[in-house]
Image: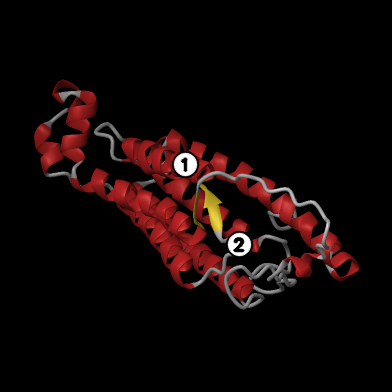
């Protein structure tokens, strides 16, 4: 690609913007997603040491219970969901995605690391594995469901999570088919795996997966994270929806598709 491709002629003035320190876009995405995998594993393996340091031994409770920690069904399912999601994202970053941008600015990378490493990777597991964590509170205390029924609900939520993750992967593979490789800006009109109803089906399936995670974890931190995910994805989906319309004009079935949540918006 040369300046002639951009119709730059002799005598034209070029302005160069300093975008700061840059990091490989693929490497940045891998770094962002590997954080929660590490942090959730550390909280699981070093629960006694972490909470003894953070809360003090007098506030941790029965040390014997921490040493022989047996996770509740909710904790067991929640950590498997988190690890499955982020390990899938790492594999997608490595083998599936084609990135149109060659680099990400270091400042943006730091913000993303803060969101995923500190918020989801630290705050969420801190309360999920907290010594005073109470599982099933909404199902047993609010809805007054028997414990046997609650276990079926967790299995149902796990199945929905698995479906959402698989559909999200299929969406990414479908989007990949429009490009030949990295730095390719080609876009097509996606029509499979939920794109018949929304412009950003990949965001919808990922959001659905996080909703199931929050319903399993049932902590304030998990619901705050899902709320943050909603606003981030809603903003991006709205922007991409209008980008499709601007690029494909009458060819894009805008009247048939919402931009984020099917049949709603």
Q: Position of residue 180 (x, y in %)?
A: 62, 78
Q: Nearer the viewer, residue 173 or 22?
A: 22
**Left or right of 263: which side holds 141?**
left
Q: Position of residue 199 (x, y in %)?
A: 72, 61
Quarter of image, res 55: top left
Q: Position of residue 52 (x, y in %)?
A: 17, 30
**Residue that sits furthest to the top in the current view:** 58
Q: Nearer the viewer, residue 47 or 61?
A: 47
**Residue that sits furthest to the left in the current view:** 64
Query: Badge 2 is on which residue?
Result: 202
Q: Nearer the viewer, residue 150 or 33?
A: 33
> Local crowd at mark 1 within 10 Å, few (<14), some, or many (≥20)?
few
Identify the element where label 1 is drawn: helix
> Local crowd at mark 2 within 10 Å, few (<14), some, or many (≥20)?
many
Q: Is residue 158 visible?
A: no
Query: Badge 1 is on which residue?
Result: 110
Above or below residue 53? Residue 205 is below
Above or below residue 6? Residue 104 is above
Q: Is residue 9 visible?
A: yes
């Amino acid at each position: 690609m040369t300046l002639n491709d951009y119709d730059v002629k002799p005598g034209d003035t070029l302005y160069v913007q300093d975008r700061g320190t840059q990091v490989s876009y693929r490497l940045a995405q891998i770094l962002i997603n590997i954080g929660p995998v590490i942090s959730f594993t550390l909280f699981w393996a070093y629960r006694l040491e972490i909470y003894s340091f953070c809360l003090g031994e007098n506030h941790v409770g029965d040390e014997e219970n921490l040493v022989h920690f047996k996770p509740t069904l909710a904790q067991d399912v929640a950590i498997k969901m988190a690890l499955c999601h982020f390990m899938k994202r790492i594999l997608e970053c490595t083998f599936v995605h084609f990135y149109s941008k060659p680099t990400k600015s270091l400042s943006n990378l730091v913000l993303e690391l803060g969101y995923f490493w500190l918020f989801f990777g630290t705050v969420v597991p801190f309360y999920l594995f907290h010594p005073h964590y109470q599982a099933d509170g909404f199902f047993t205390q609010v809805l007054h469901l028997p414990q046997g029924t609650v276990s079926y609900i967790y299995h149902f939520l796990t199945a929905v999570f698995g479906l959402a993750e698989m559909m999200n992967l299929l969406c990414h593979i479908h989007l990949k088919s429009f490009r030949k490789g990295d730095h390719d800006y080609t876009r097509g009109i996606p029509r499979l795996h939920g794109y018949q109803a929304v412009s950003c089906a990949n965001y919808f399936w990922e959001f659905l997966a996080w909703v199931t995670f929050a319903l399993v974890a049932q902590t304030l931190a998990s619901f705050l994270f899902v709320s943050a995910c909603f606003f981030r994805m809603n903003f991006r989906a709205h922007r991409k929806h209008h980008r499709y319309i601007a690029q494909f004009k009458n060819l894009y079935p805008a009247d048939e598709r919402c931009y984020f949540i099917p049949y709603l918006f």
